[in-house]
Image (cartoon, helix red, strand yellow):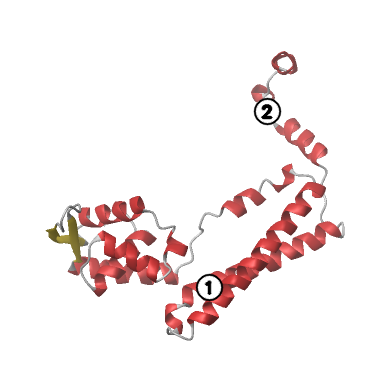
């Protein structure tokens, strides 16, 4: 392996560990099992993952068939190396926390560019969305638990737990801003930020006025 397996490669290997199948079957199963909710199911992502796994000899084309006028479908099978790499990578991902990108976390690093009065209603809106999503997904997990084993729902349980933790944090932030425990002055912060820029990197004030 030249690179660590991503979650798409993990998904493909997991399916092929069950049985050889072609990409359309993989897509159908991912939707049936609601994995598309966590994988952002896109055809291109699936085929790119398959291509990388073939390149690294972790899966191999088993047969190619055509049904009527449909395009040819290649059935893939996991290799011995693929089985070994799959279990190794899965154990690693589960055991070792990794810093994963979050659009919300990135946006929060720029929260200072909103005034407290602007930030507060946006945070309240997010809290409402989170509460609704938690209720919806929680009900889905409860309904599904009557038909499938809990092990098949642990990723949904985890997602709900993460959203509950985020909601609690957002609500605490709302409370602190509302009570004045967290406050900032945007004009002062921008003034301080401009003053911290090295003189050599500053645009002359006259140039700024000319552009305006």
Residue 59 in view here:
yes
Say which element carries label 1: helix
Report how far apart the C-alphas of labels 1 and 2 lie in the structure. 46 Å
- Within 10 Å of disc 2 (Cα), the crowding (few <14, some 14-19, many 20+) is few
Q: Residue 56, located in which quarter of the rendered image?
A: bottom left
* Residue 144, horizontal then vertical, whole percent: 48, 80
Give the residue at x 73% y 42%: 113
Q: Residue 162, located in which quarter of the rendered image?
A: bottom right
Whichever of labels 1 and 2 marks the residue nearer the N terminus, that label is: 1
Q: Is residue 91 left or right of residue 57?
A: right
Give the residue at x 46% y 77%: 153
- Within 10 Å of disc 1 (Cα), the crowding (few <14, some 14-19, many 20+) is few
**Placement of the N terminus among the 4 image quadrants:** bottom left
**Residue where numbered disc 2 is placed:** 198
Give the residue at x 70% y 68%: 168
Q: Is residue 25 left or right of residue 141?
A: left
Q: Is residue 21 above or below residue 151?
A: above
Q: Verify CB contact (< 8 Å) between mark 1 and mark 2.
A: no
Nearer mark to the viewer, of 1 and 2: 1
> Observer-nearest residue: 202 or 93?
93
* Residue 166, horizontal then vertical, whole percent: 65, 65
**Residue where numbered disc 1 is placed:** 158
Residue lying at the far right in this picture: please name it.
179
**Placement of the C terminus among the 4 image quadrants:** top right
Residue 181 in view here:
no
Q: Residue 17, located in which quarter of the rendered image?
A: bottom left
Say which element carries label 2: loop
Give the residue at x 18% y 62%: 75
Q: Is residue 202 left or right of residue 51?
A: right
Q: Is residue 21 above or below residue 142?
A: above
* Residue 22, horizontal then vertical, whole percent: 23, 62
* Residue 159, horizontal then vertical, whole percent: 54, 69
């Amino acid at each position: 392996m030249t690179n660590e397996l991503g979650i798409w490669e993990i998904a493909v290997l997991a399916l092929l560990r069950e049985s050889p199948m072609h990409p359309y079957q993989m897509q159908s199963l991912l939707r049936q099992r609601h994995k598309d909710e966590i994988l952002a199911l896109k055809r291109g992502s699936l085929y790119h993952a398959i291509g990388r796994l073939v390149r690294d000899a972790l899966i191999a084309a088993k047969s190619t068939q055509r049904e009527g006028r449909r395009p040819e479908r290649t059935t893939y099978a996991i290799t011995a190396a693929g089985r070994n790499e799959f279990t190794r990578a899965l154990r690693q991902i589960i055991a070792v926390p990794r810093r994963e990108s979050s659009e919300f976390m990135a946006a929060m690093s720029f929260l200072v560019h909103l005034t407290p009065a602007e930030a507060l209603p946006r945070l309240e809106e997010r809290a409402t969305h989170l509460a609704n999503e938690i209720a919806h997904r929680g009900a889905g997990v409860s309904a599904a638990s009557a038909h499938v084993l809990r092990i098949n729902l642990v990723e949904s349980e985890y997602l709900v737990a993460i959203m509950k933790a985020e909601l609690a944090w957002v609500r605490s932030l709302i409370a602190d801003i509302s009570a004045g425990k967290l406050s900032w002055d945007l004009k002062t912060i921008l003034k301080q930020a401009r003053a911290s820029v090295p003189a050599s990197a500053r645009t002359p004030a006259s140039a700024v006025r000319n552009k305006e």
